[in-house]
Image: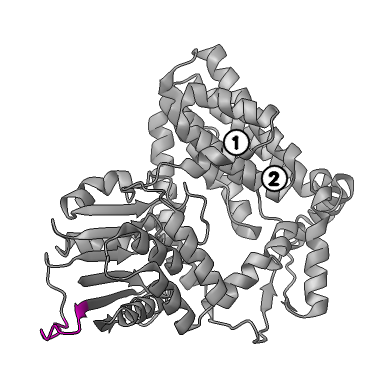
Amino acid sequence: MKILIPSVGGMGVGVLVEWLSVAAILEGLKPSVLNLPGVSQRTGRTLSYIEIRENDDNKPFSPFPEKGGLDIIISQDFLELIRILKEGYGGRGCNIIGTTYRYYTTHEKLSLKRDFYTYEYFKGVIVENSKEHIVVDIHKMGIQDFRNAHLLGILCYSGYLPSIRRESYERAIRHVGIDVEGNLRDFGVGYELLNGDRGITDGKMIESELDSLAEGFIKESIKRLESVYGNRLKEILIEAVRQLTGYQDTKYSEFYIRRVLDLNLYIRETVGETNEYNELMEEFAKVLVVRMMYEDVIRVAERKVSEERFKRIERLYRINKNEVFWVKDFFRPDLDELYGILPYSIGKMIDRILSRHKFSWKTTINTTHIFGFLMLKSMSKIRFLRKWSFRYRKENNLIENYIDHVKQCLKQGLDSAILAAKGGTIVRGYGEIRREMINAWREFSNLTNPLTMSTYIDNFFSEKRFENQKKIKMKSI
C-alpha cells in the first residue's frame, strides 16, 4: 500500500503518520516512512509518504512517490489535496480521503467574491483522479475542530486499508500517548461520521440540528423560509441561530429571524415570490449575522476565557494534562470600545466629550492567573447589559441603515440588491480600522447602480489598494 499525505505545517500530520505506522506494525506489517517537512513554519507545505508491505516483501523502499501509482491520498487541507491532484499524483486506482477545510489567505478573507475553491467546483478533478473518494464537509457535519483522529476513523471505516483492524488503530493511539482519551473519542466520531455514505456528506447533522430546535417561532420561520428559498438558506439560518444564541440569547436570535422575514416580506410585496432571489436571501442572512455579532470588549473577554480556547492551546503546543502553562494576553482597546459597554445615556455623554480624542489603553493580563481569569470572566458575564449599551445602539442603527440600503437597491433590480447585501461586509474590524470601514460603507450606501457598486467593491478590496496603503504607511514611518 502506497499512501501520500499532503498537508500544511501545524496540523499535526506527524502524529497521524505515527499512528498509521504503529497500527501497521501491530498487524505484522512493515511500514516505511518519508517525511518532507517543506517550509519550516506554520501553514508551510508538508508531504509524508508511507509504504506498507508484508514482512516477507523485500522490495526496496522508494523515497519518491510515483505519480499515478498511489493507492491512497489523505489530506486534511482541501487546497493541498487539489494541488497534489493537479501535479498528477492521483489516478484511477487511487482512493482519496479529504475534507473541505482549508486555510484562507488575508486577501481571501477580505474579498467579497465567491469562493471557487469548493468541493462542488473541483468535484470533476477529484472524480477524474480517483477510484473512489470521501470528502467530508466538516461545516455541514457540525465539526468545528476537525482533527487527524477524525481522519484516522474515516480511513478505518472506509476499508481502503483492509489489512489494519480498528483495534490496531486504537492501540496505536494509546501507544503514541498524545491526548489518548480525546483522540480515541475523535477516532470514534470519524468512524461513525459517514454512516455508509461515499462522496461529500449531505448535511444530515443540519437536519438533526433543525429537529433539536425548540418548537416555536424560530423553527417554524426557518421551515417557511426553506420552502421558498431552499436548503442552503436553512443551513445558514440554523448556524446563525446557534451562534447568535451563544453570543447573546434566544431573543436575539428571534430578532435576527424577524429581520430576515422582514426582507422576505418586502420581496414578496415588491416583486412577488420567486426562486431568483435565493442568492440575495443567502447573502443577506450571512452578512446580517456577522454584523449582529460585532466584537465588543464583552465578546473578547468571553472568548479569552472560553474552555475551548484553553483546549486548543493544549493541542497546539502539545501540553499534557499534568503540565502547567501560562497565557499572557495583550490588549489595546480604544477608549470608545471601553465606554461603549456603558448604558446609552452615559456612553453618549462621554462620547460627546472624548470622541475627538483618540486614546487607547495598553495592558497585559495573565489569563491563566486567578485574578486575570476572574476579571475577564466577570466582564464576559455582563452581556445581558449589551442591549442597553451605547455601542449596541450605534451598531443597531448601522444595521438598520444596511437593511434600508438593500431594500432601496432591490427597487433598482436584483443585481443591485445582491451587491448591497454583500457590501455590508465592508464594515469589519475594530478601533480605528472599523471607523474607516464604516465611513467607506456610508460612501458605498449612497450607490444603487450595479455597475458603480461592483466597481467600488472591486477597487475597495483589490490587492493594489492594500499595497498602496502599505506604501503610504511606510513613508509616514
The part of the chain drawn in magenta is: 52-63
Whether tag 2 and tag 1 are in contact, CB under 8 A, the answer is no
What x and y, as percent, mark residue 79? 31, 60
Circle on res. 245: 2
Give the camera-side residue of 244 and 434. 244
Per the picture, the main secondary structure of the magenta-coloured stretch is loop
**Is 477 on the left-hand or right-hand side of 46?**
right
Please report the residue visible at 80 percent of the width from the left and 44 percent of the height from the top: 387
In the picture, the quarter occupied by the N terminus is bottom left
What x and y, as percent, mark residue 467? 40, 62
What x and y, as percent, mark residue 360? 73, 68
Reply above or below: 136 against 410: below
Judge whether residue 332 is colored magenta: no
Mark 2, secondary structure of its residue: helix
Please report the residue visible at 53 percent of the width from the left and 18 percent of the height from the top: 267
Reply above or below: 295 against 373: above
What x and y, as percent, mark residue 179? 54, 77
Reply above or below: 411 against 48: above
How many numbered markers are drawn?
Answer: 2
Amino acid at dot 2: Thr
The image quarter containing residue 93 is bottom left
Which badge, 2 or 1, comes first in the chain's sequence? Answer: 1
Judge whether residue 57 is colored magenta: yes
Circle on res. 211: 1
Amino acid at dot 1: Asp
The label nearer to you, 2 versus 1, is 1
* Label 1 crowd bin: few (<14), some (14–19), many (20+), radius 10 Å: few
Mark 1, secondary structure of its residue: helix
The span from disc 2 to disc 1 (Cα, nearest Å) is 16 Å
**Is 36 on the left-hand or right-hand side of 114?**
left
Would you say residue 63 is visible in this rendering? yes
Give the camera-side residue of 13 and 161. 161
